[in-house]
Image: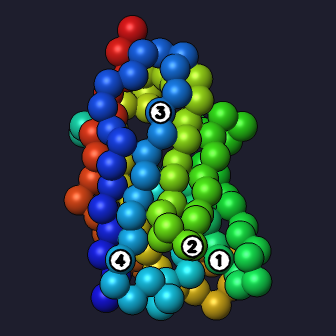
């Protein structure tokens, strides 16, 4: 079992930056893929970014097109946290943000298949204002 807890949500102005943190606990060694997802009111949950731990300190990141080039996901195995930073935020970044964990054999599997993530946090709300 892996437990996840998000933090860092709140209000941010257009063009600003947000930093979210996901704290992992429990049997974290059983999950080598952590993803950030978001769900805006009236919309389906969508993937934002994932990080795959390939061992030996190697991490592979993957980003949705909507945030690619203005976001960064980072995993700190010592602190057992995964942070997501999004810069130049837009109104459409407003959503409830969730982190989730899964285990895969290969890096290319660590993507946005929501149904394949067995562990989820409770979410943290981000509101972008003009």
Give the CA separation, mark 3 to mark 4: 23 Å
Q: Which mark is residue 18?
A: 3
Label 4 crowd (10 A; few <14 / some 14-19 / many >=20): some
Q: Which residue is mark 2?
A: 77
> Is 64 situated above or below 89?
below
Q: Which SS class for mark 1?
A: strand
Pair 1/4: label in front? 4
Q: Is residue 112 visible?
A: no
Pair 1/2: label in front? 2
- Mark 3 or mark 4, which has the lower sequence index? 3
Quadrant housing the C terminus = top left
Q: Residue at x 43, y 74 (%)?
A: 101
> Is 72 situated above or below 95?
below
Q: Residue at x 47, y 15 (%)?
A: 14
Give the CA separation, mark 1 to mark 2: 9 Å
Q: Is residue 15 visible?
A: yes
> Is 78 situated above or below 94?
below
Q: Quadrant of residue 8?
A: top left
Q: Percent position (x, y) of residue 74?
A: 61, 57
Label 1 crowd (10 A; few <14 / some 14-19 / many >=20): many
> In this rendering, would 31 be left or right of 63?
left
Q: Residue at x 55, y 72 (%)?
A: 78
Asked if disc 1 and disc 2 are in contact, CB closer than 8 Å, the reply is yes
């Amino acid at each position: 079992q892996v437990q996840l807890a998000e933090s860092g949500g709140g209000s941010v102005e257009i063009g600003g930056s947000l930093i979210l943190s996901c704290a992992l606990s429990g049997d974290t060694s059983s999950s080598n893929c952590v993803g950030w997802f978001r769900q805006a009111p009236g919309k389906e949950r969508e993937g934002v970014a994932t990080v795959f731990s390939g061992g030996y300190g190697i991490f592979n990141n993957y980003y949705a097109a909507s945030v690619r080039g203005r976001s960064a996901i980072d995993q700190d195995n010592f602190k057992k946290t995964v942070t997501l930073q999004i810069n130049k935020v837009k109104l459409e970044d407003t959503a409830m943000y969730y982190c989730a964990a899964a285990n895969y054999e290969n890096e290319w599997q660590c993507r946005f298949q929501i149904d394949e993530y067995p562990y989820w946090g409770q979410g943290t709300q981000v509101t972008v204002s003009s």
